[in-house]
Image (cartoon, rainbow, N blue to C red):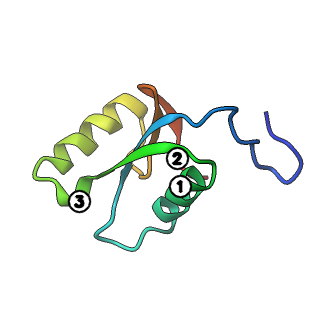
């Protein structure tokens, strides 16, 4: 549910979130997603795929799971909830 201004209200409690991101390239969307999660007090782990030896394989598997190749991809409690748009 969206409220005035087009943003969702923060959850009642911070989610446990995972955030595959691209730190090696300037990524405004990844930065925005991290900022939003920080602002609402969410504990999250950013998975920096570009710094991982198997990052390309993980990204390919994420694409199979979500039908998306873009990052960031936000996962909460094992469920894909979207990106940053």
Could you tell which of marks 1 and 3 lies nearer the N-terminus? Answer: 1
67 lies above or below 53: above
Q: Residue at x 42, y 33 (%)?
A: 66
Q: Is residue 72 above or below residue 1?
A: below
Residue at x 34% of width, y 38% of height: 63
Give the Cα separation between the discs numbered 1 and 3.
Answer: 17 Å
The image quarter containing residue 48 is bottom left
Helix, strand or loop at disc 3?
helix
Is the Cβ of the residue at disc 1 closer than 8 Å to that at disc 3? no
Name the spot of residue 42 as percent of width and height, x first.
Answer: 54, 44
**Residue situated in front as seen by the camera: 33 or 37:** 37
Kindly identify which residue carries mark 3.
50
Q: Nearer the viewer, residue 10 or 81?
A: 10
Q: Which residue is mark 1?
A: 33
Q: Decide: marks 1, 2 in contact (CB < 8 A)?
A: yes
User: How far across and how far down the image is residue 57, in percent?
Assistant: 17, 42
Residue 27 in the image: x percent, y percent? 43, 68
Mark carried by residue 17: none
The span from disc 3 to disc 2 (Cα, nearest Å) is 17 Å
- Residue at the image point whose x is 60% and y is 55% from the top: 36
**Is the Cβ of the residue at disc 3 closer than 8 Å to that at disc 2?**
no
Crowd tier of the residue under label 2, counting other residues whose Cα lies within 10 Å: few below 14, some 14–19, many 20 or above: some
**x 55%, y 60%: residue:** 35
Read off the residue under disc 2: 83
Q: Residues within 10 Å of mark 3 (few under 14, many from 20)?
A: some
């Amino acid at each position: 549910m969206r409220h005035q201004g087009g943003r969702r209200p923060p959850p009642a409690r911070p989610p446990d979130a995972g955030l595959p991101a691209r730190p090696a390239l300037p990524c405004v969307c990844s930065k925005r997603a991290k900022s939003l999660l920080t602002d609402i007090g969410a504990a999250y782990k950013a998975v920096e795929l570009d710094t991982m030896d198997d990052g390309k394989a993980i990204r390919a598997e994420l694409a199979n799971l979500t039908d998306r190749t873009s990052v960031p991809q936000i996962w909460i409690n094992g469920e894909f909830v979207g990106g940053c748009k």
